[in-house]
Image (tube, rainbow, N blue to C red):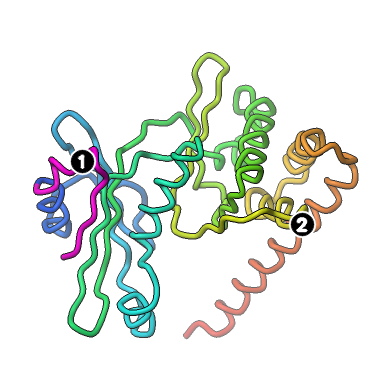
Amino acid sequence: MKAVFSDSYKNQQSKVEELISNFSNNQGKLFGNGDRNTIKIFQLDHKQINIKSFKEPNFINRIAYKFFRKSKAERSFNYAEHLIAKGIGTPAPIAFAENNSSFLFKDSYYVSEHLPYDLTYRELVTNPNYPDHEKILRAFTHFTYSLHEKKILFLDHSPGNTLIQINNGDYKFFLVDLNRMNFKKLSEQERLKNFSRLTPKKEMVKIMADEYSKLINKSSEDIFNKMWKYTVDFQNRIKRKHMLKSKFKP
């Protein structure tokens, strides 16, 4: 097993590697539904940590990750370090680990500190009466703007991938599921499209568009029309995808 650790956790490398080696056993507390990848919470001395086991890729990707591409675990680790260096919230990275055979990639793990939080963006979608709903949504828009200004395009900017902490009206945001990102100067189109996965609710898009328009000094109506178009386009793609799956499902 290849394992790379952050400097602050190198003295606990053997303990973490043991947890990874025994991941499939009945150790740790399962976190989330585990429909794609499996996340477990472990106790490491006085801290709780997350270990994310990525699903074994298909045969083509097993070759690609072995010879040509960085694994999802390695990208998650590298991107977490980059985000923190840029002042963007994410659970502190601890390590990534990979298992390989001579010719094929097998599986990988990403380890990070477990971060307590009050809600995710998803709760804002499912509960329009959540306390201070609009204030949190506007603060989230500022957070997304800060990503864009720092040349960070989070490709999985979706409802479950932003953790939110609330402290007496102060909102802090933390990104998770980090393995898909680009780092470059963003066009207006790329910025506004980055909101398209978050919510199908028009009233929420209006609030985000209004706040973002102030930050980039553009017409609120114009920004909303573009942002809503990208949202509708994304929702239609999802619907078509589900229709095709149901049509061809055995």
Residue at image point 79% right, 39% down: 216
Q: Quadrant of the N terminus?
A: bottom left
Q: Residue drawn 25% across and 81% down?
A: 104
Magenta-tinted stretch: 1-14
Residue 11 within the magenta-colored segment of the rendering? yes
Q: Which residue is at the front of the view, 124 or 153?
A: 153
Q: Residues within 10 Å of mark 2 (few under 14, many from 20)?
A: few
Look at the picture and state if 250 lies above or below 206: below
Task: Please tell me which residue lies in front, 165 or 25.
Answer: 165
Q: Quadrant of residue 150?
A: top right
Question: At which x and y percent is residue 4?
Answer: 23, 55
In the rendered image, residue 158 lying in the magenta stretch gets the answer: no
Q: Is residue 205 left or right of residue 91?
A: right
Compared across the picture, whether 58 is left or right of 221 comes to left
Residue at disc 2, secondary structure: helix
Quarter of the image holding residue 66? Answer: bottom left
- In percent of width and height, residue 18 lies at 10, 52
- The residue indicated by pointer 1 is 9
Horizontal relation, residue 148 to residue 44: left or right: right
What mark, if any, has residue 118 been given in the picture? none
On residue 189, which mark appears?
2
SS for callout 1? helix
Residue 248 coordinates in the image, percent (x, y)? 55, 85
Q: Is residue 97 above or below residue 56?
A: above
Q: Earlier in the sequence, mark 1 or mark 2?
A: 1
Along the viewing direction, whichever of 118 and 113 lies nearer the viewer: 113
Give the vertical position of 20 relative to 125 (above or below): below
Q: Which residue is depicted at the point 50% across and 35% down?
A: 87
Mark toward the viewer: 1 or 2: 1
Q: Residue furthest top?
A: 168
